[in-house]
């Protein structure tokens, strides 16, 4: 045996590459790959700058399969986006709200006044919340991070052996890629038909082309989990939210539905300055109600602004129910006026596939899929 | 009306808790996972990555574990993951200069690893240098089965550490690439970007220095795995 063999015999043992570290290292590489891909796409087929990666005479990276993929991504954007939002990040609504909040009388028209003490009107509450959101330090998440949401689902109705069954309350956790390129996951575990069921829906990693993967093909590109494309004026935001909130129905319902649908309810994180604009836009709408002593589905007290689901809509699906049976609420901390979440409740006949109550419990930025803050 | 609901997604149906695996496993797969990369050499994969950069992930999947083991032995497992990340980022950015005549990319990756480890040592200063010079594991963790071998190894340990510390950085890197990474002389020459003759002469010199440091113990006991 020579000295090198001795040194080899003294070689320290090395543990396996921890899975989490391995995924992180690989994702760093994938980010560099995506960056190069994006640079190539940005330069365009005619004017692409060399990346320095390929030697002289090599086929440019902007041609071949990758170029076709880039082109295709742009082409399928509309349909795929709609498909994904209808499945992976779709909505759950509905049934008997066990909430303890009480809808008050509609508040007066917005005066635009910001109250120094407890708000007396819904508009005042919204403007306070806007001021708080504007003053919040904004930490922009990184493109490789994920928006984590935790929602409480109550009264979800399933069909089991030809009969309906309301499953016990459960949590749904969702991770969505900040820039939409790095996948995501929706996960829920609940009791159905007397046994535990785990439902998971992986969101494809769109940064890696997989034309043979049906999930990738159907859903890419995925909308970014962190929304940065919202209007930047109050008037623009108002018009945008009213459009998103539905073409028909009272303005309070439409604008609050627009806020929920463009943010927490669809598992999206909105920058604080955009939330501020949303609240200011809502403050311009008459008829939003103030709930001074609201309780979130998580049991936390707060102040809420709310709107009833209009009867014309209720009647179409819940005959015989009158009053403000279904409502949408945005809940704020009673002391800081910071937006803490929202919930939507519904009363009516249990229909398979519907949910009684959906409430945002937590929204945060995390580094990895499956990470719980 | 938005009354109907999306969730719950596809029913796993097995009544077991979710693992989060599908999405994460998918993230770990590369183009080759569905593209028949198994028969391709590393050089062919790198050539593919010139056109489709995603192919480079295949190289990561093939060699990341091995590079991690080497980095863990050199710098400790706490920073080994970062080293692997740096190695493959550097390799990806410099893949255009890869010699396609070399089918196995391991020597190239080890060469990059040596540079990253060296940079890491400089960045972390004296403490890191000490760690990189000395093997990380304790003698009790060494891959020796017999108790007598363990005793001998334990006796040898401090002297071997001293011998390694006395080597120049290049000589130490070279001998560790051969002894710990298992590279042949020719592969070590590729990794260090030096002629094969230089490898032979340096290793000859290094062996003599080690022999002087560890002295008679080597000759008193036949080492395991020898």
Image (cartoon, coloured by chain):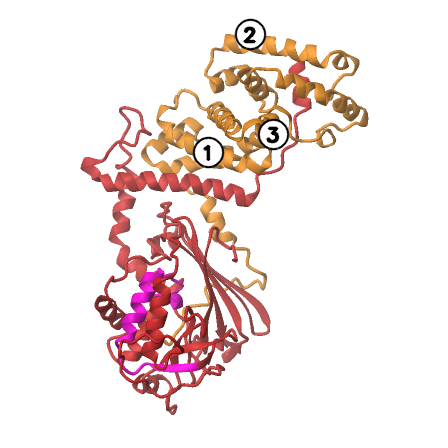
Chain colours: A red, B orange
Q: Residue at x 50, y 34 (%)?
A: B84
Q: Residue at x 29, y 35 (%)?
A: A61
Query: Which residue is tagged 2?
Result: B201
Chain-order first, disc 3 or disc 1: 3
Q: The numbered mark 2 sits on a residue in which chain?
A: B
Closer to the camera in the image, B208 or A14: B208
Above or below, B144 relative to A38? above
Q: Is residue A355 left or right of residue A44?
A: right
Query: Which residue is tagged 3?
Result: B73
Above or below, B32 relative to A285? above
The percent coordinates of residue A19 (x first, y second) are 55, 44
Q: Which residues are magenta?
A: A263-292
Viewer-nearest of labels 2 and 1?
A: 1
Disc marking residue B86 = 1
Closer to the camera in the image, A58 or A145: A145
Q: The numbered mark 3 sits on a residue in which chain?
A: B
Closer to the camera in the image, B27 or A337: A337
Residue A319 occupies quadrant? bottom left
Secondary structure under the numbered disc 1 in the rendered image: helix
Chain-order first, disc 3 or disc 2: 3
Residue A77 occupies quadrant? bottom left
């Amino acid at each position: 045996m020579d000295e090198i063999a001795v040194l080899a015999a003294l070689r320290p043992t090395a543990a396996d590459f921890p899975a989490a570290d391995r995924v992180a290292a690989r994702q760093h590489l994938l980010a560099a790959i995506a960056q190069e891909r994006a640079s190539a796409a940005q330069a365009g087929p005619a004017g692409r700058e060399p990346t320095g990666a390929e030697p002289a005479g090599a086929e440019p990276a902007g041609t071949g399969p990758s170029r076709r993929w880039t082109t295709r991504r742009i082409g399928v954007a509309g349909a795929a986006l709609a498909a994904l939002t209808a499945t992976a990040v779709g909505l759950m609504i509905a049934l008997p709200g066990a909430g303890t909040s009480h809808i008050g009388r509609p508040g007066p028209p917005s005066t635009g006044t910001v109250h120094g003490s407890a708000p007396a009107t819904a508009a005042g509450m919204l403007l306070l919340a806007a001021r708080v959101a504007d003053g919040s330090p904004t930490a922009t998440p990184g493109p490789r991070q994920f928006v984590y949401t935790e929602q409480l689902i109550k009264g979800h109705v399933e069909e089991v052996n030809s009969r309906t069954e309301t499953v016990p309350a459960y949590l749904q956790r969702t991770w969505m890629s900040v820039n939409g390129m790095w996948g995501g996951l929706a996960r829920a575990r609940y009791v159905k038909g007397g046994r535990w069921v785990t439902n998971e829906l992986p969101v494809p990693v769109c940064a890696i082309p997989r034309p043979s993967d049906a999930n990738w093909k159907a859903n890419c590109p995925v909308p970014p989990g962190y929304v940065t494309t919202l209007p930047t004026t109050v008037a623009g935001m108002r018009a945008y939210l009213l459009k998103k909130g539905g073409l028909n129905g009272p303005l309070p319902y439409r604008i609050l539905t627009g806020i929920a649908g463009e943010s927490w309810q669809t598992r999206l994180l909105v920058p604080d300055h955009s939330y501020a604009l949303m609240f200011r836009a809502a403050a311009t709408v008459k008829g939003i109600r103030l709930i001074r002593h609201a309780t979130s589905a998580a049991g936390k007290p707060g102040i809420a602004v709310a709107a009833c689901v209009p009867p014309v809509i209720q009647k179409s699906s819940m005959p015989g129910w009158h009053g403000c049976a279904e409502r949408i609420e945005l809940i704020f901390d009673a002391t800081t006026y910071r937006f803490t979440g929202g919930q939507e409740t519904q009363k009516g006949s249990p229909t398979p596939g519907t949910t009684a109550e959906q409430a945002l419990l937590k929204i945060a930025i995390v580094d990895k899929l499956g990470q719980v803050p | 009306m938005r009354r109907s609901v999306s969730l719950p997604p596809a029913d796993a149906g097995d009544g077991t808790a979710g693992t989060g695996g599908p999405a994460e496993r998918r993230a770990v797969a590369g183009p080759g996972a569905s593209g028949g990369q198994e028969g391709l050499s590393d050089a062919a994969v790198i050539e593919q990555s010139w056109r489709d950069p995603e192919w480079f992930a295949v190289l990561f999947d093939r060699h990341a574990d091995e590079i991690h083991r080497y980095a863990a032995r050199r710098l400790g497992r706490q920073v080994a993951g970062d080293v692997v990340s740096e190695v493959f980022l550097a390799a990806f950015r410099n893949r255009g200069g890869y010699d396609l005549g070399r089918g196995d990319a391991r020597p190239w990756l080890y060469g990059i690893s040596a540079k990253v480890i060296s940079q890491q040592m400089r960045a972390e200063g004296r403490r890191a240098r000490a760690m990189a010079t000395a093997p990380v594991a304790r003698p009790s963790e060494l891959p020796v089965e017999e108790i007598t071998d363990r005793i001998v190894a334990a006796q040898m340990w401090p002297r071997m550490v001293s011998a390694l510390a006395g080597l120049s950085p290049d000589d130490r890197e070279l001998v560790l690439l051969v002894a710990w990474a298992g590279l042949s002389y020719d592969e070590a020459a590729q990794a260090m970007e030096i002629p094969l003759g230089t490898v032979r002469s340096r290793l000859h010199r290094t062996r003599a220095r080690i022999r002087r440091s560890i002295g008679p113990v080597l000759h008193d006991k036949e080492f395991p795995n020898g």
